[in-house]
Image (tube, grey):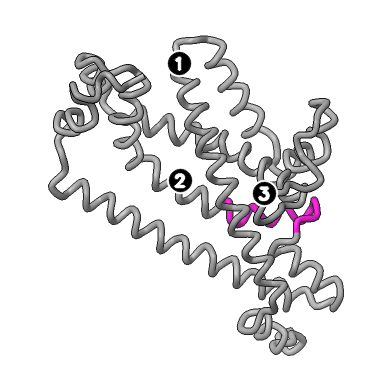
Amino acid sequence: MLASVDWHVVWVRIAHPDHVFFLALTRTVYVAVIAQVIGVVLGVGAALMRMSKAAPLRFISGIYVWIFRGTPLLVQIFFVYYGANQLLGFTLIPNSLNLGFFSLDGAIVGGILALGINEGAYMREIVRAGIDSIDKGQMEAAKSVGMRYGLAMRRIVLPQAARVIIPPLGNEFNNMLKNTSLLFTIGVYEMFADAEIGYSNSFQPVEYFLGVAFWYLVLTTVWTFIQAGIERKLAASERGEELSFFERLQAAWNPISTWRVR
């Protein structure tokens, strides 16, 4: 069986990828990064809505998570790209998006939005768990010195919750790098698309899919080391000379800056 594999093709795909492949790899990375940022922003917003005293906000947050965690990501990608414009009655996904210094194809825009919206539903639970891990007394102490809820959340609660949020966030980004392969189904030319087209032209599935699997391993391994470094720094700050809560509170909110807070 191994003798039937053209190892020269595998070697070329791993050690000497062409320019087109590197464009596909670059696209995989920036799609994953942008989608993850969107997911984090949506996750934080949905988590704060979930913790709101307003029942409609809690309901919207719950429906959001219910839908996007309860349906397949592939279905969501197709729906956003092919159905969003028709459903909404206006152009949410353009044919192309010109950002001045470069432009994005509509399929890339739709894929990023679909991945980001889906990720936001998972990030909501991660962010909510991180906020819940912080002693409620810290919010009460912040309010007792005059801080508003939003300011206390930004300056006191969320920075501490980040230590709980970042490890699972890193794992989510690892998954995001792999989930970009699903965008091939709507015509985005990323790493898996490059392998699929190469296989279709050569009928060498083992060679091309071994090659792309190697590069996915490279991306996720590099990110694993980055994530480990971030987590080590967070752990070191916990063990080191960290400011106490009240020192952090004083630095974040003081009488001089009170009048500037809106």
Q: Residue at x 73, y 75 (%)?
A: 208
Circles 1 and 2, Cβ within 8 Å, touching? The answer is no
Q: Earlier in the sequence, mark 1 or mark 2?
A: 1
Circles 3 and 1, Cβ within 8 Å, touching? The answer is no
Q: Can you identify the residue that label 2 sits on?
A: 169
CA gap, disc 1 and disc 2 = 23 Å
Image side of residue 176 versus residue 144, left or right: right
Q: Give percent across and percent down for residue 256.
A: 19, 24
Per the image, label 1 sits on a secondary structure element best described as loop
Task: Say the numbered circle drawn on residue 99.
Answer: 3
- Residue 80: quadrant of the picture: top right
Q: Residues within 10 Å of mark 1 (few under 14, many from 20)?
A: few
In terms of secondary structure, what is the magenta stretch mainly?
helix
Q: Earlier in the sequence, mark 3 or mark 2?
A: 3
The question of residue 260 being in magenta is answered with no
Q: Residues within 10 Å of mark 3 (few under 14, many from 20)?
A: few
Per the image, label 3 sits on a secondary structure element best described as loop
In this view, the mark in front (3 or 2): 3
Q: Amino acid at mark 1?
A: Ser
CA gap, disc 3 and disc 1 = 36 Å
CA gap, disc 3 and disc 2 = 28 Å
- Residue 254: quadrant of the picture: top left
Q: Can you identify the residue that label 1 sits on?
A: 52
Task: Say the numbered circle drawn on residue 225.
Answer: none
Q: Amino acid at mark 3?
A: Leu
Q: Give percent across and percent down for residue 147.
A: 27, 18
Magenta span:
176-188
